[in-house]
Image (tube, grey):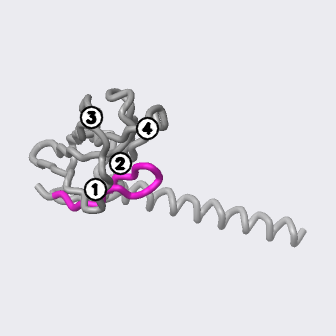
Amino acid sequence: MKTQLKFSIVILILFSVLYVFSCTKNASTEPNEENVEFSAYQVPGCNSGGLLKINNSDSCFAYSFDDKLKIDFCVTGNCCPDSQRYVTDYNIISDTIFVSVADTAAHLCRCICNYSIHLELSGLEKDKYVFYCNFDERIKYKEVVNK
């Protein structure tokens, strides 16, 4: 009988903790993602004109933030095919935007190109966000964007 009572108390505590965690998680996911519209695409064509020298100081990040947040940034990949090869996804938690970019055509050629990704987010409620971009299993960009 004591074992059953202990088991019931543990289950009750577990459900209570899970309920509090789910309420806290939902409250911190601002803005409401159902109001946010996201679109992203790769600009066709290789931007390097041939072999690309890898440079640690990347200056290929630009944004504008009015009604929509528009961001242009670069990712590297082999030079064939030169269009429709990247898949993007996003997640917003509080004032942080996480974007992941995946190359669907890796290792098809030996040449390397710089490609531009254009994305737009509308329905954002805050005036300032931290933008993270994950590419090739590492953080490619960490930028603060302001209205």
For the residue labelled by badge 4, is the local secondary structure a helix, a strand or a loop?
Answer: loop
Quadrant location of the N terminus in the rendered image: bottom right
In the image: residue 97, left or right of residue 66: right
Q: Write down the residue under mark 3.
A: 46
Q: Write down the residue under mark 1.
A: 131
Q: Earlier in the sequence, mark 3 or mark 4?
A: 3
For the residue labelled by badge 2, is the local secondary structure a helix, a strand or a loop?
Answer: strand
Question: Pointer 3 and pointer 4: residues touching (CB < 8 Å)?
Answer: no
When the figure is inspected, residue 32 is found, relative to residue 94, above or below; the finding is: above
Magenta-drawn segment: 132-145
Q: Nearer the viewer, mark 3 or mark 1?
A: 3
Between the residue at mark 3 and the residue at mark 4, the CA separation in whole angstroms equals 14 Å
Q: Write down the residue under mark 4.
A: 110
Q: Write down the residue under mark 2.
A: 99
Based on the displayed image, in which of its 4 quarters is residue 19 positioned? bottom right
Q: Residue furthest right?
A: 1
Q: Earlier in the sequence, mark 3 or mark 2?
A: 3
Question: Pointer 1 and pointer 4: residues touching (CB < 8 Å)?
Answer: no
Image location (x, y in percent) of residue 93: 36, 56
Question: Pointer 3 and pointer 1: residues touching (CB < 8 Å)?
Answer: no
For the residue labelled by badge 1, is the local secondary structure a helix, a strand or a loop?
Answer: strand
Q: Nearer the viewer, mark 1 or mark 4?
A: 4
Question: Pointer 1 and pointer 2: residues touching (CB < 8 Å)?
Answer: yes
Badge 3 density bin: few <14, some 14–19, many ≥20, Cα 10 Å: many
Q: Earlier in the sequence, mark 3 or mark 1?
A: 3
Mark 3 is on which residue type? Cys
Mark 1 is on which residue type? Phe
Image location (x, y in percent) of residue 49: 23, 37
